[in-house]
Amino acid sequence: MVLMMGRPRQGTVSERGRSVHLFKIRKDREPGSLTALCGCRFHRQDVEFLGEVRGMPCEICLTRTSDPSGEPSEGTTALCEAKGLA
């Protein structure tokens, strides 16, 4: 699995709705539809994948990431607590 950053392509949603989401994607296949870590679903052709960090992140996707050990990071834990998700 690879963690990829992507956002809805321009014109598919309002500019405000173009948050950068995180997707876990299997290396061995090209999916037709994608589900972000936050649960939002997209058609593959409607997602612009990003090769570098830029844009407004989806906070829920960020709260569902972990550090390399698989444990929630300190920043993720703090954000979850601030959003009432912990």
Image (cartoon, grey):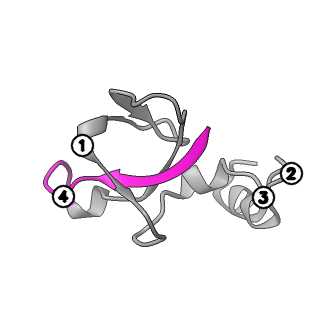
Is label 3 or label 1 in front? 1
First along the sequence among labels 3 and 2? 2
Q: Magenta segment, which residues? A: 1-14
Determine whether the residue tagged by mark 1 lies in a helix, strand or loop. helix
Q: Tag on residue 11?
A: none
Q: Secondary structure at mark 4?
A: loop
Percent across and percent down for residue 63 are 65, 53
Would you place residue 75 above or below residue 24 in this image? below
Residue displayed at 80% across by 55% down: 68
- Residue 83 rendering spot, x and y as whole percentages: 64, 57
What whole-number distance in Å separates the C-alpha atoms at marks 4 and 2? 35 Å
Q: Earlier in the sequence, mark 3 or mark 1?
A: 1
Mark 4 vs 2, N-terminal side: 4
Kind of residue at badge 4: Gln
| 61 on left or right of 86 | left
* Position of 74 relative to 68 (above/below): below
Q: Which residue is mark 3?
A: 77
Task: State the mark number for residue 10.
Answer: 4
The residue under label 2 is 69
Tell which residue pokes out farthest to the bottom in this image: 54
Which residue matches tag 1?
46
Instruction: Determine whether the residue tagged by mark 2 lies in a helix, strand or loop.
Output: loop
Identify the residue at horizontal 74%, vertical 52% (top origin).
Answer: 66
* Mark 1 neighbour class, 10 Å CA radius: few under 14, some 14 to 19, many 20 or more: some
